[in-house]
Image: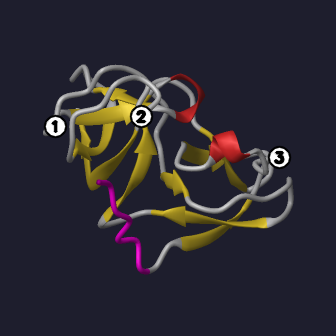
């Protein structure tokens, strides 16, 4: 069972249309064009996880600490370090220079599963 202990998510402006339900629990990055956030791509420096939906220009909530739900992009073992994968999913970290891990998995997962992640940012 995954839980969500994000008592104080931050509010950001959606830099793109983030209203589709498939965007929920995806990793987001800072969007320099809008000054808001957008879905992160593979290896992107992430700022948090989208925990509410909104159209471009609307306020959305982004989890940045404690634990939250995330969408697995591959098979993941509990305890594995996680990074942003393609289209905002999390994948097992390959610890190479310049890659930011966002946290670690608190449960095993298959691709597409929603699992709990503990935020633990580290730069390699």
Classify mark 2: helix, strand or loop: loop
**To which quarter of the image does residue 91 belong?**
top left
Q: Give the image location of residue 41, x and y in percent.
A: 56, 28
Q: Is residue 62 left or right of residue 18?
A: left
Whether residue 77 is in magenta: the answer is: no
Give the residue number, with chain letter if any, for mark 2.
113
Nearer to the camera, 94 or 91: 91
Kindly report which numbered mark, 3 or 1, lies closer to the viewer in this rendering.
Answer: 1
**Image quarter hosting the C terminus:** top left
Give the residue number, with chain letter if any, for mark 3.
17
Kindly report which numbered mark, 3 or 2, lies closer to the viewer in this rendering.
Answer: 2
Classify mark 1: helix, strand or loop: loop
Q: Is residue 87 above or below residue 53?
A: above
Res 78 label? 1
* Magenta residues, start to end: 1-7
Q: Give the image location of residue 8, x and y in percent.
A: 46, 79
């Amino acid at each position: 069972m995954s839980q969500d202990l994000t008592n104080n998510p931050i509010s950001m402006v959606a830099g793109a249309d983030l209203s589709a339900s498939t965007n929920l629990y995806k990793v987001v990055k800072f969007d320099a064009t809008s000054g808001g956030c957008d879905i992160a791509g593979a290896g992107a420096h992430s700022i948090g996880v989208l925990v509410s939906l909104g159209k471009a220009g609307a306020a959305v909530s982004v989890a940045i600490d404690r634990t939250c739900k995330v969408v697995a992009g591959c098979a993941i073992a509990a305890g594995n370090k996680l990074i942003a994968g393609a289209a905002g999913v999390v994948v097992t970290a390959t610890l190479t220079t310049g890659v930011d891990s966002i946290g670690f998995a608190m449960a095993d997962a298959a691709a597409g599963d929603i699992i709990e992640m503990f935020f633990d940012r580290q730069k390699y």
